[in-house]
Amino acid sequence: MKTTVVLVLSAIMSCAVAFLSPEGMAAEPAELDGLIEPYLVVNVGSSVPGILDMVKVDRGALVKKGQVLARLQDKVERANMALAKARARMKSTIAARQARLDYAQRRQQRMESLFKKKAIPFEEMDEFRTNTVLAEMELADAVENIGLAELEYKRSVEVVKRMTIYSPITGVVMERFLTAGEYVEDQPVLRLAQIDPLNVEVFAPVEIFGSIKAGMQASVIPEAPIGGNYAAKVVIVDQVIDAASGTFGVRLEMPNPEYQLPAGLKCVVVFPQTH
């Protein structure tokens, strides 16, 4: 009986040693320090120089993509747009040239009949034919001018649009640099951050390189007092190791639909089953 117990204990000890040895060691989760950052940060400015007429948002404001953020003074541009619109709608010249062409064609038809009967000389007939051709050219010129006026109107509309600054993303205003009355040329007016989703940046030790792959799920635990546990997905794994620190970069993407998490937090990222 004692011999049997000894043999069983020996077998258990052997299994334990094998399990703890490097060859038999089980995969364990890895907990790494990380930083929660905005998904995207953009500086928003004006595509044309001018004086700001208004800035409608301030720091901390929530904005949606396409929302009007600011507008430059545009009274002159809007006046030019109204003038171009009026010119594009002036159809009276075309109507007058069309009426003149119709009259010239009717006269030519009557003269052609007389010319066939040799009732009028060729010189007179040639004059009627030339008048018809000139009337056709004048009508074509009027149509072209209206076409150019319509293009000028479209151009002026785009000029006015460029005087308005729209939000390129849905997010929050990080910083406001300028206000109404200031001149803007090539500097930003606002800085915006997209915080849904959030990026989580991690530097992992080279020992676990190959264990973390794009598409892998991980848990993100923000620092106190926020806390909690949030799911994230690996989207980028750097393929170049930093020799000085012996680490490689990993980026995770974490949904933040209700903006419950602010950017800029330190966190712990738990990767399951790394070795």
Image: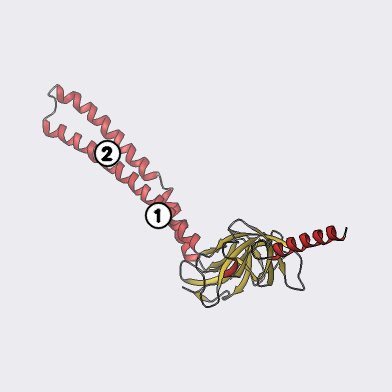
Q: Is residue 94 above or below residue 182?
A: above
Mark 2 = which residue? 136
Label 1: how many residues lie within 10 Å, few (<14), some (14-19) or many (20+)? Answer: some
Using the image, tell me which numbered label, if any, was put on residue 253.
none
- Mark identifier at residue 152: 1
Q: Quadrant of residue 227?
A: bottom right
| In the foreground, 105 or 165 | 165
Residue sitting farthest toward the top: 117
Residue at (20%, 28%) from the top-left corner?
111
Which comes before the other along the chain, label 2 or label 1? 2
Three-letter amino acid code at the position of disc 1: Glu
Q: Position of residue 91 (x, y in %)?
A: 40, 44
Q: Position of residue 96 (x, y in %)?
A: 35, 41
Q: Quadrant of the N terminus?
A: bottom right
Identify which residue, 228 or 153, lies in the foreground.
228
Please name the amino acid that badge 2 sits on: Glu
Disc 2 packing (10 Å; few <14; some 14–19; many ≥20): some
Circle 2 SS class: helix
Q: Residue at x 19, y 26 (%)?
A: 112
Which secondary structure, mark 1?
helix
Is 11 or 69 nearer to us in this picture? Answer: 11
Relative side of 109 to 43, left or right:
left
**x then y, percent, for residue 263:** 66, 69
Q: Nearer the viewer, residue 170 or 163?
A: 170
